[in-house]
Structure formats: C-alpha cells, structure tokens
Image: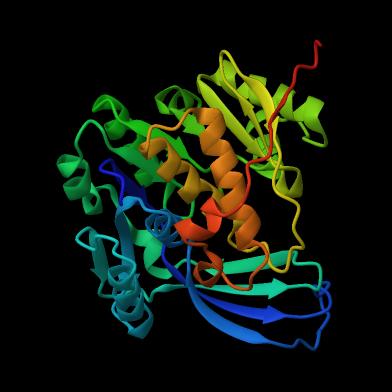
Amino acid sequence: MPSPTLICVVGSSNTDMVVKAEKLPAPGETVIGGKFLMNPGGKGANQAVAAARLGGQVALAAKVGNDVFGKQAIQQFQREKINPKYITTDPEQPSGVALINVDAKGENCITVAPGSNSRLKPEDVELILDDLQPSALVLLQLEIPLPTVDYVIRRSFEKGLRVILNPAPAQPLPADLFTCLHLITPNETEAELLTGIRVTDLKTAEKAAQELRTKGVPNVIITLGSKGAYLLTDTISTLIPAPPVTAVDTTAAGDCFNGALAVALAEDLPLEQAVAFACKAASICVTRMGAQASLPHRREVNSLPLINHIPYSSNS
C-alpha cells in the first residue's frame, strides 16, 4: 500500500544513453564499447521512480522539452503511478540528455546536456508548493537551477515541511540555506566540496558530517558507496553497512538511496531504519545496468535481511 504521506520530488528529467566498455576513456582516447542502452533518467526522475516503486505516493515537479523524449518521459511517469500534474513543457529547449560510460567494474562517468531542466523556474513550481500539505516530504537535487532549488527549500521550510537535499552534482550552496534543511545526503565528493574536508574513511566522514551540522543541518547522511552510509544527528553517530554485492553499474545508486530514504521517512520509520532500508535498495540497484531500469520494487528490498548498524564515535 502506498504511504499516505506525499513525497514531492523537484528535479531533473533526462534520457540516458549508456555505453558499457572495459574501461572509461582517457582524454583524447576512443574506447570500443559493448552494450548500448537508452533509458529514462535524470536525478529528479530517478528519485521519483525509485520512491514510487517502493510504495511512495509521489508527485514530480520537472520540465521537459516538446519532443519525443519529453513525451516518453511523461508516459513513463504515468506508468509508474507518479502524479504528472506538475510537469511543465518548454516550447523551445529540448529535453535533457545524459551520455554515460560504464566500465567493467561498474564505475561511470557522465556528461549531461540539461536542456529544458535548465529552465525550471520558481514560477514553474508554485502550484505544487501551494498544494503541499504540512505532512509532505520534499526531495531535491542540484540538476536544476540553484535559484529554483533555493526557492523551493525556503518556501518549504516556511510551510514547516521536511526537506531532504541530495546535493548532487556537487556545487557550493548559500550559507543560510543549510538551516532550512531537515536532512542532507552528500556522497564523499559532495561532502568535501561543502565542508572542505576530504572524506577517506569513517573518521573523516564523521568530521565532515559534524561540519554540516555546524552549518545548521540537524540530520546528516554521508553515503560511502559499498561501505554503506554514515548517519549523524544530535543523538546518533553510526555506520549503516550496505549488503555486499557485485556492482555492475553504479549510475543511479545515489538516486535509488534517496528515493528509498524518502519512502521510509514517509512511513515514519526511525532514521537508522530508514537509512538501512535505503542501503538495501541501493545495493540491488548497482547489480543492474541503467538508471530507472535498475531501480528495485518493494518486494525485492523486503526480501533482503537487515544488516546491523555499527555505532561509531571517533572519541570512543
């Protein structure tokens, strides 16, 4: 049964063009690849689909082009039972596309042409912000213009809504924006850009998380890839491991994590359990190729056993 708490995702929608090869090309190098896939993607759309497949009641605010990719995206959202009411169409810019190379170990490099995503403006999201009830969760990323992200976060905070920011792709944020967040979910690279602290192990993850709390975010999750995720709140400091798997493609792992996290919080799970649920979902995602094609359904996540979290403090 879907959660009665609405998950409002504000973000990007792309079409991903993926090539699998033995290695990622160096500058100036041509690599002969193997399998080619064309899949719906974009961080906002990925997180919305991840949440919907896991049982969330989801609405997506995004902007697509007036082209075949945009029309296919809206049809896909409808199939996934995502409310498309707040998706607008840009009459001039094409839909966003992403060119993705994936190597034999599942690592990737991505180039994005944002297209219509770059024109998602504050006025495009007014309707969904007006419609949101106090119980709603708001989930954002940084593949849309920062002024729009800033506007949505501040408006949501004023309405008393819980806001989750996945600060990807990494970029600097206004200093006073952190205090409007309920939760932030950077990976190691994003945490370093936001804090100046290079995250290489659990101790530096804790240090970066403490810096983000100092900036005003009450709850911090730093995702650590195959190691899992480090969670820091005013009462919790813990590493929540990810189930061990063989990664094939990590393209949408972070998006899957964030969508799953939102679902668990919408269902009022305690934060540690919510992070564990998100780690399980992401661990399934990386065993498959593609972005939205790799996102698991609820029954798959429920079939995996929980892994005990590891309480942590650098002072202990």
Nearer to me, 9 or 90:
9
Nearer to me, 262 or 304:
304
Screen quadrant of the C terminus:
top right
Percent position (x, y) of residue 169? 58, 51
Observer able to see residue 185: no
At 38% from the left and 80% from the top, the residue drawn is 69
Please state the total of marks drawn on the protein image. Answer: 0
Note whether 244 is above or below 63 in the view shown.
above
Note whether 111 is above or below 170 in the view shown.
below
At 58% from the left and 61% from the top, the residue drawn is 252
Nearer to me, 220 or 119:
220
Note whether 172 is above or below 177 in the view shown.
below
Percent position (x, y) of residue 121? 30, 52
In the image, taking residue 264 as reference, residue 290 lies left or right, namely right
At 60% from the left and 40% from the top, the residue drawn is 186
Q: Quadrant of residue 95?
A: bottom left
Q: Quadrant of residue 136?
A: top left
Note whether 209 is above or below 125 in the view shown.
above
How did the renderer colour the structure?
Answer: rainbow
Nearer to me, 189 or 225:
225
In the image, taking residue 290 as reference, residue 86 lies left or right, namely left
At 22% from the left and 42% from the top, the residue drawn is 129
Percent position (x, y) of residue 212? 60, 24
Percent position (x, y) of residue 234? 56, 13
In the image, taking residue 202 as reference, residue 254 lies left or right, namely left
Observer able to see residue 294: yes
